[in-house]
Image: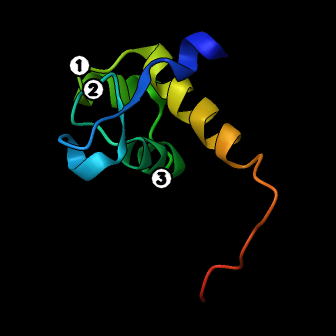
Amino acid sequence: MADLLSRITINPTICHGQPTVRGLRYPVQNVLELLASGMTEAEILADYEDLEADDLRACQAYAAELLKTKTFYRLAS
């Protein structure tokens, strides 16, 4: 898991400090939204040639780590 998480970087000069994949301009949020939309791994990798399969898994691992927080708040509906 640590190897995957090392692929996620935060740099204040890239994408306004959002977590991104390997310092590229691919925010974790966008990758997760692509996966949630139903795109397959193969489709995403074909559309975004800079990304690797482990990058997609790293985004999912990062989201899983964020969910380990102690406090949750309901999103506005």
Q: Residue at (65%, 46%) from the top-left corner?
A: 66
Q: Which amino acid lies under the numbered mark 3 shown in the image of this protein? A: Ser
Q: Which of marks 2 and 3 is nearer the N terminus?
A: 2
The amino acid on which the numbered mark 2 sits, given as a three-letter code, is Gly
Image quarter (top left, top right, bottom left or bottom right) of the N terminus: top right
Numbered disc 1: secondary structure: loop
Among numbered discs 3 and 1, the one appearing first in the sequence? 3
What x and y, as percent, mark residue 49? Answer: 22, 19
Q: Are marks 3 and 1 in contact (CB under 8 Å)?
A: no
Q: How far apart are marks 2 and 3 (CA)?
A: 24 Å
Q: Residue 27 at what x, y percent from top left? A: 33, 42
Q: How crowded is mark 3: few (under 14 residues within 10 Å), some or many (20 or more)?
A: few
Q: Tag on residue 50?
A: 1
Q: Name the residue under label 2.
A: 23
Relative to 71, is 61 on the left or the right? left
Q: Is mark 2 on a helix, strand or loop?
A: loop
Between circles 1 and 2, the one closer to the viewer is 2
Kindly identify which numbered label has been placed on residue 37.
3
Q: Mark 3 or 1, which is nearer the eye?
A: 1
Q: In which quarter of the image is the C terminus?
A: bottom right
> Going by the picture, which residue comes out furthest to the top?
3
Which residue occupies the foreground of this view, 9 or 46? 9
Kindly report the distance in space between the C-alpha atoms of the residues bearing marks 3 and 1. Answer: 20 Å
